[in-house]
Amino acid sequence: MRCRKCNSSAVINMRHHKLALCGEHYGEWFVDSTQRAIEKYKMFDRDARILVAVSGGKDSLALWDVLTRLGYTSDGLYIGLGIQGDIAYSDQSLARIREFQEKVVPAATLHVVDIQETYGKTIPQIARENTRGHGKPCAACGLTKRYVMNRLAAERGYTVLATGHNLDDEAAVLMQNTLHWQTGYLARQAPVLEASDGLARKVKPFCRFYERETATYALVRGIDYVYDECPHAVGNLTNFYKTLLNQLENESPGAKLQFYIQFLKARAEGFFQAPADKTELHACEVCGQPTTAPGRCAFCRMWNITSAQSAVISADAIPVRGQDEFDDVEARVAESVDVSGL
Ligand code: AMP
Ligand code: FES
Ligand code: ZN
Ligand code: ZN
Protein backbone atom coordinates (compact mmCIF):
# COMPACT_ATOMS: atom_id res chain seq x y z
CA MET A 1 0.00 0.00 0.00
CA ARG A 2 1.19 3.54 -0.82
CA CYS A 3 0.59 7.06 0.46
CA ARG A 4 -2.37 8.57 -1.33
CA LYS A 5 -0.60 11.96 -1.46
CA CYS A 6 3.00 11.22 -2.45
CA ASN A 7 2.94 7.55 -3.41
CA SER A 8 5.77 6.70 -1.01
CA SER A 9 5.68 3.20 0.40
CA ALA A 10 5.93 4.01 4.13
CA VAL A 11 2.27 4.12 5.02
CA ILE A 12 -0.13 4.39 7.89
CA ASN A 13 -3.28 2.58 6.96
CA MET A 14 -6.58 3.89 8.38
CA ARG A 15 -9.07 1.20 7.49
CA HIS A 16 -12.11 3.03 8.86
CA HIS A 17 -11.33 6.12 6.73
CA LYS A 18 -10.22 3.99 3.75
CA LEU A 19 -7.09 6.12 3.69
CA ALA A 20 -3.35 5.30 3.63
CA LEU A 21 -0.69 7.99 4.18
CA CYS A 22 3.04 8.34 4.84
CA GLY A 23 4.22 9.81 8.17
CA GLU A 24 4.53 13.35 6.89
CA HIS A 25 1.16 13.38 5.16
CA TYR A 26 -0.42 11.65 8.13
CA GLY A 27 0.74 14.59 10.29
CA GLU A 28 -0.79 17.05 7.83
CA TRP A 29 -4.05 15.10 7.68
CA PHE A 30 -4.22 15.04 11.48
CA VAL A 31 -3.62 18.80 11.80
CA ASP A 32 -6.16 19.63 9.05
CA SER A 33 -8.74 17.29 10.59
CA THR A 34 -8.32 19.04 13.94
CA GLN A 35 -8.92 22.43 12.31
CA ARG A 36 -12.04 21.03 10.60
CA ALA A 37 -13.37 19.80 13.98
CA ILE A 38 -12.62 23.21 15.56
CA GLU A 39 -14.68 24.88 12.83
CA LYS A 40 -17.44 22.27 12.66
CA TYR A 41 -18.22 22.54 16.35
CA LYS A 42 -17.42 26.30 16.52
CA MET A 43 -14.86 25.73 19.27
CA PHE A 44 -12.91 28.99 19.04
CA ASP A 45 -11.58 31.47 16.52
CA ARG A 46 -8.17 32.86 15.67
CA ASP A 47 -8.03 35.44 18.50
CA ALA A 48 -8.84 32.93 21.24
CA ARG A 49 -6.53 32.59 24.24
CA ILE A 50 -6.50 28.86 24.83
CA LEU A 51 -5.53 27.05 28.00
CA VAL A 52 -4.53 23.46 27.18
CA ALA A 53 -4.83 21.06 30.11
CA VAL A 54 -1.76 18.85 29.73
CA SER A 55 -1.39 15.61 31.63
CA GLY A 56 1.90 14.41 30.07
CA GLY A 57 0.03 11.77 28.07
CA LYS A 58 -0.01 11.54 24.26
CA ASP A 59 -3.39 13.20 23.68
CA SER A 60 -2.88 16.47 25.50
CA LEU A 61 0.73 16.93 24.33
CA ALA A 62 -0.34 16.17 20.75
CA LEU A 63 -3.12 18.74 21.19
CA TRP A 64 -0.72 21.44 22.35
CA ASP A 65 1.52 20.60 19.38
CA VAL A 66 -1.32 20.73 16.83
CA LEU A 67 -2.78 24.00 18.14
CA THR A 68 0.70 25.54 17.93
CA ARG A 69 1.17 24.31 14.35
CA LEU A 70 -2.21 25.78 13.47
CA GLY A 71 -1.01 29.16 14.77
CA TYR A 72 -3.28 29.46 17.82
CA THR A 73 -2.12 31.17 21.00
CA SER A 74 -2.14 28.63 23.79
CA ASP A 75 -0.66 28.15 27.24
CA GLY A 76 -0.50 24.91 29.23
CA LEU A 77 -1.79 23.89 32.63
CA TYR A 78 -0.43 20.89 34.51
CA ILE A 79 -1.95 19.81 37.80
CA GLY A 80 0.51 17.86 39.95
CA LEU A 81 -1.59 15.27 41.76
CA GLY A 82 1.13 13.59 43.83
CA ILE A 83 0.35 10.17 42.33
CA GLN A 84 3.57 8.19 42.07
CA GLY A 85 2.99 4.40 42.28
CA ASP A 86 5.93 2.26 41.06
CA ILE A 87 6.46 4.50 38.07
CA ALA A 88 6.75 7.98 39.66
CA TYR A 89 3.69 8.82 37.58
CA SER A 90 3.28 12.50 38.50
CA ASP A 91 7.02 13.31 38.45
CA GLN A 92 7.42 11.60 35.11
CA SER A 93 4.43 13.47 33.68
CA LEU A 94 5.80 16.88 34.67
CA ALA A 95 9.25 16.01 33.28
CA ARG A 96 7.79 15.06 29.87
CA ILE A 97 5.69 18.24 29.79
CA ARG A 98 8.62 20.49 30.66
CA GLU A 99 10.76 18.85 27.94
CA PHE A 100 7.97 19.31 25.42
CA GLN A 101 7.38 22.91 26.40
CA GLU A 102 11.05 23.88 26.12
CA LYS A 103 11.39 22.19 22.75
CA VAL A 104 8.10 22.93 21.02
CA VAL A 105 6.41 25.91 22.69
CA PRO A 106 9.19 27.85 24.45
CA ALA A 107 7.27 31.13 24.24
CA ALA A 108 4.16 29.71 25.92
CA THR A 109 3.49 29.76 29.65
CA LEU A 110 3.21 26.48 31.50
CA HIS A 111 1.11 26.91 34.64
CA VAL A 112 1.95 24.27 37.20
CA VAL A 113 -0.43 23.80 40.10
CA ASP A 114 1.00 21.35 42.58
CA ILE A 115 -1.83 20.09 44.76
CA GLN A 116 0.32 19.10 47.73
CA GLU A 117 2.22 22.39 47.78
CA THR A 118 -1.00 24.34 47.41
CA TYR A 119 -3.43 22.45 49.62
CA GLY A 120 -1.07 20.51 51.87
CA LYS A 121 -1.86 16.95 50.77
CA THR A 122 -1.53 14.74 47.74
CA ILE A 123 -4.62 13.36 46.00
CA PRO A 124 -4.13 9.83 47.44
CA GLN A 125 -3.83 11.35 50.95
CA ILE A 126 -6.97 13.49 50.77
CA ALA A 127 -8.86 10.63 49.12
CA ARG A 128 -7.87 8.23 51.91
CA GLU A 129 -9.18 10.69 54.51
CA ASN A 130 -12.45 11.17 52.66
CA THR A 131 -13.13 7.51 52.02
CA ARG A 132 -11.68 6.31 55.34
CA GLY A 133 -9.13 4.27 53.45
CA HIS A 134 -11.65 2.55 51.15
CA GLY A 135 -11.97 2.97 47.43
CA LYS A 136 -9.87 4.62 44.76
CA PRO A 137 -8.78 8.27 44.66
CA CYS A 138 -10.29 8.88 41.20
CA ALA A 139 -13.39 10.76 42.42
CA ALA A 140 -11.36 13.14 44.61
CA CYS A 141 -8.91 13.51 41.75
CA GLY A 142 -11.60 14.33 39.18
CA LEU A 143 -13.25 16.88 41.44
CA THR A 144 -9.93 18.61 42.18
CA LYS A 145 -8.81 18.66 38.53
CA ARG A 146 -12.14 20.11 37.33
CA TYR A 147 -12.04 22.77 40.04
CA VAL A 148 -8.47 23.90 39.40
CA MET A 149 -8.93 23.90 35.59
CA ASN A 150 -12.12 25.96 35.79
CA ARG A 151 -10.79 28.42 38.24
CA LEU A 152 -7.47 29.01 36.57
CA ALA A 153 -9.03 29.37 33.11
CA ALA A 154 -11.64 31.85 34.35
CA GLU A 155 -9.37 33.87 36.61
CA ARG A 156 -6.54 34.11 34.11
CA GLY A 157 -8.91 35.29 31.39
CA TYR A 158 -8.58 32.38 28.96
CA THR A 159 -11.27 32.14 26.30
CA VAL A 160 -11.42 28.35 26.43
CA LEU A 161 -10.06 25.35 28.24
CA ALA A 162 -9.02 22.58 25.83
CA THR A 163 -8.58 18.97 26.91
CA GLY A 164 -7.14 16.01 25.02
CA HIS A 165 -10.21 13.73 25.27
CA ASN A 166 -10.27 11.43 22.24
CA LEU A 167 -12.97 9.32 20.59
CA ASP A 168 -12.23 6.28 22.76
CA ASP A 169 -12.69 8.40 25.91
CA GLU A 170 -15.91 9.96 24.63
CA ALA A 171 -17.40 6.70 23.33
CA ALA A 172 -16.67 4.92 26.64
CA VAL A 173 -18.39 7.67 28.65
CA LEU A 174 -21.26 7.65 26.16
CA MET A 175 -21.68 3.91 26.57
CA GLN A 176 -21.64 4.21 30.34
CA ASN A 177 -24.22 7.02 30.30
CA THR A 178 -26.41 5.19 27.79
CA LEU A 179 -26.43 1.91 29.70
CA HIS A 180 -27.65 3.85 32.72
CA TRP A 181 -29.86 6.22 30.66
CA GLN A 182 -28.29 9.20 32.34
CA THR A 183 -30.20 11.68 30.21
CA GLY A 184 -28.90 14.71 32.09
CA TYR A 185 -25.29 13.65 31.45
CA LEU A 186 -26.11 12.74 27.84
CA ALA A 187 -27.54 16.22 27.28
CA ARG A 188 -24.27 17.72 28.48
CA GLN A 189 -21.82 15.41 26.69
CA ALA A 190 -20.54 17.47 23.78
CA PRO A 191 -17.38 18.64 22.00
CA VAL A 192 -18.10 22.14 23.35
CA LEU A 193 -19.49 23.12 26.74
CA GLU A 194 -20.43 26.78 26.81
CA ALA A 195 -19.23 28.94 29.68
CA SER A 196 -21.89 29.43 32.32
CA ASP A 197 -22.16 30.89 35.79
CA GLY A 198 -18.41 31.31 36.24
CA LEU A 199 -17.52 27.95 34.65
CA ALA A 200 -15.00 28.11 31.82
CA ARG A 201 -15.91 27.27 28.23
CA LYS A 202 -14.56 23.77 27.50
CA VAL A 203 -13.61 22.17 24.20
CA LYS A 204 -12.38 18.76 23.05
CA PRO A 205 -10.76 19.24 19.63
CA PHE A 206 -9.69 15.54 19.42
CA CYS A 207 -13.12 14.05 20.12
CA ARG A 208 -13.31 12.50 16.63
CA PHE A 209 -9.85 10.88 16.70
CA TYR A 210 -9.37 7.26 17.69
CA GLU A 211 -6.87 6.84 20.49
CA ARG A 212 -4.52 5.01 18.13
CA GLU A 213 -4.67 8.00 15.78
CA THR A 214 -3.43 10.42 18.44
CA ALA A 215 -0.76 7.88 19.45
CA THR A 216 0.36 7.64 15.82
CA TYR A 217 0.52 11.43 15.58
CA ALA A 218 2.67 11.62 18.73
CA LEU A 219 4.96 8.95 17.26
CA VAL A 220 5.25 10.63 13.87
CA ARG A 221 6.08 13.95 15.56
CA GLY A 222 8.59 12.39 17.98
CA ILE A 223 6.66 13.58 21.04
CA ASP A 224 7.96 11.87 24.16
CA TYR A 225 5.03 11.21 26.48
CA VAL A 226 4.17 9.09 29.51
CA TYR A 227 3.11 5.67 28.19
CA ASP A 228 1.71 4.37 31.45
CA GLU A 229 -1.70 5.45 32.53
CA CYS A 230 -2.43 6.56 36.08
CA PRO A 231 -1.83 3.51 38.35
CA HIS A 232 -5.32 4.00 39.83
CA ALA A 233 -7.03 3.82 36.44
CA VAL A 234 -5.98 0.21 35.83
CA GLY A 235 -9.07 -1.98 35.77
CA ASN A 236 -11.58 0.86 36.11
CA LEU A 237 -15.01 0.82 34.50
CA THR A 238 -14.11 3.24 31.72
CA ASN A 239 -11.31 0.91 30.62
CA PHE A 240 -13.75 -2.00 30.66
CA TYR A 241 -16.07 -0.11 28.28
CA LYS A 242 -13.09 0.80 26.11
CA THR A 243 -12.25 -2.91 25.79
CA LEU A 244 -15.84 -3.75 24.84
CA LEU A 245 -15.90 -0.99 22.23
CA ASN A 246 -12.58 -2.21 20.81
CA GLN A 247 -14.07 -5.68 20.35
CA LEU A 248 -16.97 -4.11 18.51
CA GLU A 249 -14.58 -2.03 16.40
CA ASN A 250 -12.57 -5.14 15.46
CA GLU A 251 -15.70 -6.82 14.15
CA SER A 252 -17.00 -3.72 12.50
CA PRO A 253 -14.42 -1.02 11.66
CA GLY A 254 -15.83 2.47 12.14
CA ALA A 255 -18.46 1.38 14.68
CA LYS A 256 -17.00 3.47 17.48
CA LEU A 257 -16.98 6.63 15.39
CA GLN A 258 -20.55 6.02 14.21
CA PHE A 259 -21.75 5.41 17.76
CA TYR A 260 -20.40 8.81 18.81
CA ILE A 261 -21.19 10.85 15.69
CA GLN A 262 -24.78 9.59 15.47
CA PHE A 263 -25.22 10.40 19.14
CA LEU A 264 -24.05 13.97 18.53
CA LYS A 265 -26.53 14.21 15.64
CA ALA A 266 -29.41 12.95 17.78
CA ARG A 267 -28.37 15.31 20.53
CA ALA A 268 -28.28 18.28 18.13
CA GLU A 269 -31.80 17.32 17.01
CA GLY A 270 -32.95 17.69 20.61
CA PHE A 271 -33.19 13.99 21.45
CA PHE A 272 -31.66 14.53 24.86
CA GLN A 273 -33.06 17.49 26.74
CA ALA A 274 -31.48 18.88 29.86
CA PRO A 275 -33.95 18.32 32.72
CA ALA A 276 -36.55 21.12 32.78
CA ASP A 277 -36.09 21.75 36.48
CA LYS A 278 -32.44 22.57 35.97
CA THR A 279 -30.81 22.86 39.37
CA GLU A 280 -29.72 26.40 40.00
CA LEU A 281 -26.11 27.18 40.71
CA HIS A 282 -25.05 29.35 43.65
CA ALA A 283 -21.69 30.89 44.42
CA CYS A 284 -19.76 28.88 47.02
CA GLU A 285 -19.78 30.94 50.22
CA VAL A 286 -16.04 30.42 50.61
CA CYS A 287 -14.41 30.50 47.17
CA GLY A 288 -17.20 31.92 44.99
CA GLN A 289 -17.09 29.07 42.46
CA PRO A 290 -20.46 27.84 41.18
CA THR A 291 -22.05 24.97 43.12
CA THR A 292 -25.43 23.27 43.29
CA ALA A 293 -25.29 22.84 47.06
CA PRO A 294 -26.08 25.74 49.35
CA GLY A 295 -23.06 26.86 51.43
CA ARG A 296 -19.65 25.52 50.56
CA CYS A 297 -18.88 23.82 47.24
CA ALA A 298 -17.84 20.15 47.10
CA PHE A 299 -14.20 21.16 46.62
CA CYS A 300 -14.08 23.41 49.69
CA ARG A 301 -15.87 20.74 51.73
CA MET A 302 -13.52 17.99 50.64
CA TRP A 303 -10.40 20.06 51.32
CA ASN A 304 -11.97 21.54 54.44
CA ILE A 305 -11.42 25.08 53.23
CA THR A 306 -13.22 27.56 55.43
CA SER A 307 -11.71 30.95 54.77
CA ALA A 308 -12.93 33.49 52.26
CA GLN A 309 -9.28 34.35 51.62
CA SER A 310 -9.18 31.36 49.31
CA ALA A 311 -10.91 33.56 46.74
CA VAL A 312 -7.59 35.35 46.29
CA ILE A 313 -5.90 33.23 43.68
CA SER A 314 -5.41 35.53 40.77
CA ALA A 315 -2.17 36.95 42.16
CA ASP A 316 0.93 36.33 40.11
CA ALA A 317 3.16 33.33 40.55
CA ILE A 318 3.54 32.60 44.23
CA PRO A 319 6.83 31.01 45.32
CA VAL A 320 6.41 27.49 46.58
CA ARG A 321 6.88 27.11 50.32
CA GLY A 322 7.53 24.05 52.44
CA GLN A 323 4.61 22.46 54.23
CA ASP A 324 6.06 23.21 57.67
CA GLU A 325 5.72 26.91 56.98
CA PHE A 326 1.94 26.61 56.92
CA ASP A 327 0.54 27.17 60.38
CA ASP A 328 -3.04 26.26 59.73
CA VAL A 329 -5.58 25.62 57.05
CA GLU A 330 -6.29 29.32 56.57
CA ALA A 331 -2.70 30.25 55.92
CA ARG A 332 -2.50 27.38 53.46
CA VAL A 333 -5.62 28.48 51.70
CA ALA A 334 -4.35 32.05 51.44
CA GLU A 335 -1.59 30.65 49.24
CA SER A 336 -4.28 28.88 47.28
CA VAL A 337 -3.28 27.85 43.79
CA ASP A 338 0.42 28.09 43.06
CA VAL A 339 0.93 29.14 39.50
CA SER A 340 4.42 29.35 38.19
CA GLY A 341 4.97 30.59 34.68
CA LEU A 342 8.11 29.22 33.07
P1 AMP B 1 -8.02 11.65 31.62
O1 AMP B 1 -9.25 11.97 32.39
O2 AMP B 1 -6.85 11.31 32.46
O3 AMP B 1 -8.26 10.71 30.47
O4 AMP B 1 -7.60 13.02 30.93
C1 AMP B 1 -8.42 13.70 30.03
C2 AMP B 1 -7.81 15.06 29.74
O5 AMP B 1 -7.78 15.84 30.94
C3 AMP B 1 -6.36 15.02 29.26
O6 AMP B 1 -6.28 14.83 27.87
C4 AMP B 1 -5.87 16.38 29.67
O7 AMP B 1 -6.28 17.36 28.75
C5 AMP B 1 -6.61 16.63 30.99
N1 AMP B 1 -5.80 16.21 32.17
C6 AMP B 1 -5.77 15.01 32.77
N2 AMP B 1 -4.92 14.99 33.82
C7 AMP B 1 -4.40 16.23 33.91
C8 AMP B 1 -3.46 16.86 34.79
N3 AMP B 1 -2.89 16.20 35.79
N4 AMP B 1 -3.16 18.17 34.57
C9 AMP B 1 -3.74 18.85 33.56
N5 AMP B 1 -4.63 18.31 32.70
C10 AMP B 1 -4.96 17.02 32.85
FE1 FES C 1 -6.62 10.93 39.00
FE2 FES C 1 -5.74 8.62 38.38
S1 FES C 1 -6.74 9.10 40.17
S2 FES C 1 -5.47 10.47 37.30
ZN1 ZN D 1 3.00 10.96 1.63
ZN1 ZN E 1 -15.67 26.57 47.21
Image (tube, grey):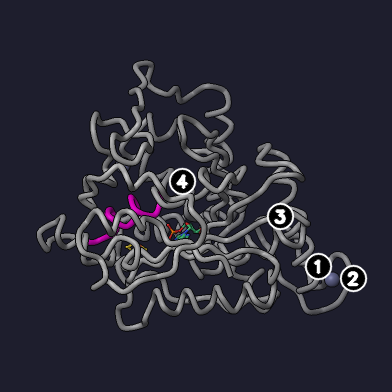
Residue 212 showing in the rendered view:
no
Q: Is residue 106 positioned above or below 145 on the image?
A: below
Q: Amino acid at mark 4?
A: Asn
The x, y position of residue 240, in whole percent, is 34, 59
Distance from the alpha carbon under mark 1 to that under mark 4: 36 Å
The x, y position of residue 2, in whole percent, is 82, 72
Q: In the rendering, which numbered label is found on residue 25?
A: 1
Q: Amino acid at mark 3?
A: Thr
Q: Residues within 10 Å of mark 1 (few under 14, many from 20)?
A: some
Q: Residues within 10 Å of mark 4 (few under 14, many from 20)?
A: many
Q: Residue at x 30, y 78 (%)?
A: 85
Q: Quadrant of ligand 2?
A: bottom left
Q: Secondary structure at mark 1?
A: helix
Asked whether the beta carbons under mark 2 and mark 4 sit within 8 Å of each other, the answer is no
Q: Which residues are magenta?
A: 136-146
Q: Amino acid at mark 1?
A: His
Q: Is residue 198 positioned above or below 242 on the image?
A: above
Q: In the rendering, which numbered label is found on residue 54?
A: none
Q: Is residue 129 positioned above or below 104 on the image?
A: above
Asked whether the beta carbons under mark 1 and mark 3 sit within 8 Å of each other, the answer is no
Whether ligand 3 has any atom under 8 Å from the Cβ at mark 1 is answered as: yes
Identify residue for label 2: 6
Asked whether the beta carbons under mark 2 and mark 3 sit within 8 Å of each other, the answer is no
Identify residue for label 4: 150
Q: Secondary structure at mark 3?
A: strand
Considering depth in this image, is 112 or 321 the residue closer to the camera?
Answer: 321
Quadrant (top left, top right, bottom left, bottom right) of the N terminus = bottom right
Whether ligand 3 has any atom under 8 Å from the Cβ at mark 2 is answered as: yes
**Upstream in sequence: badge 4 or badge 3:** 3
